[in-house]
Amino acid sequence: MAATTHTVTNQVPPLVGHDVFATDRVLSESVERHVEPGVLPVALEELGELGRAAGSAQAQEWGAQANAHPPVLRTHDRYGHRVDEVEFHPAWHRLLGHAVSAGLTDAWGRPAGHVRRAAGFLVWTQAEAGHGCPLSMTHAAVPALRTDPELAAVWEPLLTSHTYVEGLRNPREKAGVLFGMGMTEKQGGSDVRSNTTRAEPLSGEGAYLLTGHKWFCSAPMSDGFLVLARAPGGLSCFLVPRVLPDGTRNVFLIQRLKDKLGNRSNASAEVEFDGTWARLVGEEGRGVRTIIEMVAATRLDCVVGSAGLMRQAVAQAVHHSTYRDVFGGPLIDKPLMRNVLADLALESEAATVLAMRLAAAYDADTEAERAFLRLALPAAKYWVTKRCTAVVGEALECLGGNGYVEESGLPRLLREAPLNSIWEGSGNVQALDVLRALQREPQALDAFLREVGKARGADHRLDAAIKGLLTELADLDGVEGRARRLAERFALVLQGSLLVRWAPPEVADTFCASRLGGDWGAAFGTLPHSLDLASVVARARPVAD
């Protein structure tokens, strides 16, 4: 029977059926900036296709289903044999398959590959973030495997394939594979040099048997893993395949799946090795150095993924405020809400511009850009991933009670938001990595200062911030206790310099006034009211078809 008591009005239409890439002006401008003209048309076409898919009702439904039906561990089959398999909802496989086919594991061999992939990762993360973990690790495994040309020749074509093949079987029978990583152990956490997993050499060249455990092993259904273990020559890097060349299962005992705050669609496991066959990657005793390039690439994805979560949250907040009427007019026109939205949009734009600049440095692959990344990447990972939770939480509040219910999608974003700040080294690890770069690689600071110096003289607040940073670096007394402060300042100065160079004047002016000039409160919505905040908000609006 139809309800007759009232008529529903003033409800916001869902943000669906739009091109997530094309309606993100900041991201599309970044791609046009960093991709050479000969490649740009192809890049824009592929990102447009991915953007339309990410904004579709179908992709949004896949994301909801994958999180409503988290993975399930099957340790044994009906006869009592160990199988150690993780079963995923079909929606997970559809999301992952679409991502792989879009090239989100393929960056290292394509022109402007890192910028194209980073833009795609930022776009597709907005459909569902959990399946980004295996995408990220598969992409990031390539530089580590390249330390062994023989291994790279076998695995790299499979890792960078645009074909997704679900299920465990001999990799030689598959058109594409996924990779994971295992470093963290119960007793050490981020202190991987305290790992106790043992690697005993076999008679075959490069072959070992592993005994030990990994406390966090994400995406345990992957075809292979790069792990750290202690060989006779010291801590070393190994490739552990799930299925051996003869088709039998390797010993990979999944003890349980983690019950996590967010990231519900993705499986994270505790894994035991007990006579597990492994192949040495790189040299014995140089495991951290071998795997560090994989870690660096996944850290970039933490920055990109956080930028994607922020963009989706801000898009939802601006969209809601555009269609919601309060106190006699659209919510977006109310001065205080406009201030909040502008503040959120500013944070999102700064994160996106920085993430894409880092991706472009990977594409350039020069000595100067590698030095720049050594300092800029941990600073960005520290700051952007921390800002993500604050941005998503404030964006949720813009929707009021509607944002607090699951149907809005904002609670899932909020649960996901802290993840990238923890994985691949939490905040203190990143801040200390900034210090290590300063102390051990003076060329990193030189490269950073050359980058921010490109904007010197364009804004007095940026100039003052650069000077203040140098003053801070001149006094290294108690520097470890100030490491977070330094990492934050590096990130903000870099973001400010990029926005001054590339963003519209109203965006750069507002960023420099608030983040660098100190004209800002302790919460969002405290920007100087005299600035052109309406233009900042309009730039962030996702326009539905």
Image: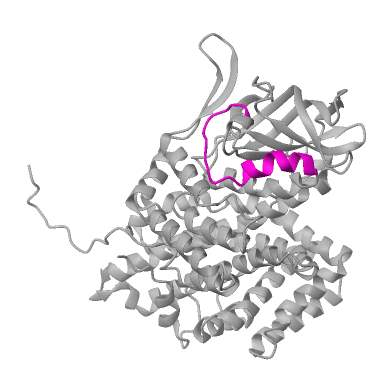
Relative side of 184 to 412, left or right: right
Q: Residue at x 39, y 77 (%)?
A: 538
- Is 149 magenta? The answer is yes
Q: Residue furthest top?
A: 79
> Residue 56 occupies which quadrant of the picture?
bottom left
Residue at (69% x, 45% y) in the render: 141
Q: Residue furthest front?
A: 38
On screen, residue 9 above or below 244: below
Task: Say which quadrant the C terminus sits in.
Answer: bottom left
* Image location of residue 241, percent across then percent down: 69, 30
- Looking at the picture, how far across and down is residue 399, in whole percent? 36, 61
* Res. 519 visible in picture: no
Q: Residue at x 38, y 53 (%)?
A: 404
First to last magenta residue range: 148-170
Residue placed most toward the observer, 540 or 243: 243
Quarter of the image containing the N terminus? Answer: top left
Residue at 26% x, 71% y is 326
- How many numbered marks have been drawn onto this rendered protein structure? 0
Q: Residue 419 placed where, x, y %? A: 58, 49
Residue 35 forms part of the magenta stretch: no
What is the x, y in percent for residue 197?
Answer: 80, 30
Please tell me whether residue 81 is drawn above or below residue 129 in the rendered image.
Answer: above
Query: Is residue 328 depicted above or below 362 in this figure?
Result: below
Q: Is residue 99 left or right of residue 336?
A: right
Question: Would residue 178 appear left or right of 432 to someone viewing this image?
Answer: left
